[in-house]
Amino acid sequence: MTHRNLVVLTGAGISAESGVPTFRADDGLWCGHRVEDVATPQGYAADPALVQDFYNQRRRQLAEVRPNAAHRALADLAARWEGDFLLVTQNVDDLHDRAHAQTPPGAGFELIHMHGELLKARCTRSGVVMDWAGDMAADQASPHHPQGLMRPHIVWFGEMPLEMERIEAALEACDLFVSIGTSGAVYPAAGFVQSARYAGARTVEINLEPTQGARLFDEGVYGPATQAVPGFFDGL
Ligand code: BV8
């Protein structure tokens, strides 16, 4: 069966073999922090220095990691895919961006970072988003508003993910939905498989092991992403 309109959702598991830690380690902590202390507007308001340092550490780490075979397999697929292909990532690293930069220009690859990006910052007053590669101070003045501060351009818990209308439109039109390296613990991303099923799409979960939402998928492909992802898409 040939597919025309593909939506791929990725999570932290696709970057794990590049050395980027996933979120839900066994101790439930995230790099030693409680999620609510570092990934909520309340946590930022309570201790902006702690939150900025948490993101400064992760932004610095990007220099030490590289895209892996799973990121590259998706970029190669985009270069040869003839229909629509939307890649939605929950990840805030730039590994998909870097893998795609190595493919021919104009390849059919739309990428949405629905939870924001480590390499971008946002003015708290004007909402203007700008590239940001270095550290950010707790009281980082904004060049866009006299009373504004710069915060990470990251979607925290309780905040609306980005580009939801584009994502929902693509899910309604897709005939193949592939979820890669995500535990299915966070909404609305965890609900995308239901939208794809409702649209009549074939749904596939690719993960290290079956997730809590595995039964929602038509098929499961299990193993490390650097093997399972190329294996699945090479055969497509
Ligand atoms: C919103 C940015 C509404 C931060 C992130 C009760 C029930 C249902 C929902 C809720 C509820 N209470 C609250 C909610 C909503 C909440 C939510 O879902 N909470 C959960 C915890 C219950 N969601 C929100 O708040 C969202 N916003 O709902 O807004 C709204 C409406 C109107 C107006 C305003 C607001 C916003 C959620 C976004 C939060 N931000 N990230 C940052 O990154 O610093 S979420 C964070 O979790 C990351 O983005 C991450 O990507 C995401 C999901 O985690 P995963 O990627 O899945 O990572 P995880 O570690 O969990 O899993 C990794 C998987 O990989 C595992 O399955 C593992 O087996 C696998 N793996 C590991 N190694 C490999 C591998 N697979 C393959 N190969 C390997 N080598």
Image (tube, helix red, strand yellow):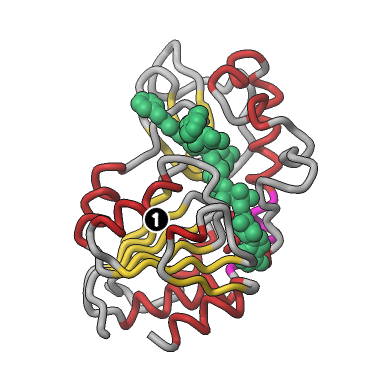
The image shows residue 51 at horizontal and vertical percentages of 65, 27
Tell me the residue at 21%/51% (across/down): 169
Query: Which amino acid, mark 1?
Result: Val
Local SS, label 1: strand
The image shows residue 24 at horizontal and vertical percentages of 68, 46
Direction front: furthest residue:
215
Q: Can residue 93 be seen in this view?
A: no
**Residue 218 lies in the magenta-colored region:** no
Q: Nearer the viewer, residue 206 or 80?
A: 206
The image shows residue 115 at horizontal and vertical percentages of 46, 42
- Where residue 17 sits, quadrant-wise, is bottom right
Direction bottom: furthest residue:
235
Question: Looking at the rendering, in which quadrant would you find the C terminus?
Answer: bottom left
Task: Reply above or below: 7 against 29.
Answer: below
Task: Reply above or below: 102 against 19.
Answer: below
Tell me the residue at 66%/57% (across/down): 63
Q: Is residue 7 left or right of 138 when viewed as pictured?
A: left
Direction top: furthest residue:
147
The image shows residue 223 at horizontal and vertical percentages of 63, 74
Q: Mark 1 points at which residue?
A: 88
The residue range painted magenta reads 61-67
Circle 1 residues within 10 Å: few <14, some 14–19, many ≥20: many
- Mark 1, ligand 1, within 8 Å: the answer is no
Tell me the residue at 79%/42% (across/down): 27
Q: How many labels does the image show?
A: 1
- Where residue 32 sits, quadrant-wise, is top right
Q: Is residue 124 left or right of 12 when viewed as pictured?
A: left
Q: Is residue 84 left or right of 61 when viewed as pictured?
A: left
Question: Looking at the rendering, in which quadrant would you find the N terminus?
Answer: bottom left
Q: Can residue 139 be seen in this view?
A: yes
Tell me the residue at 71%/25% (across/down): 50
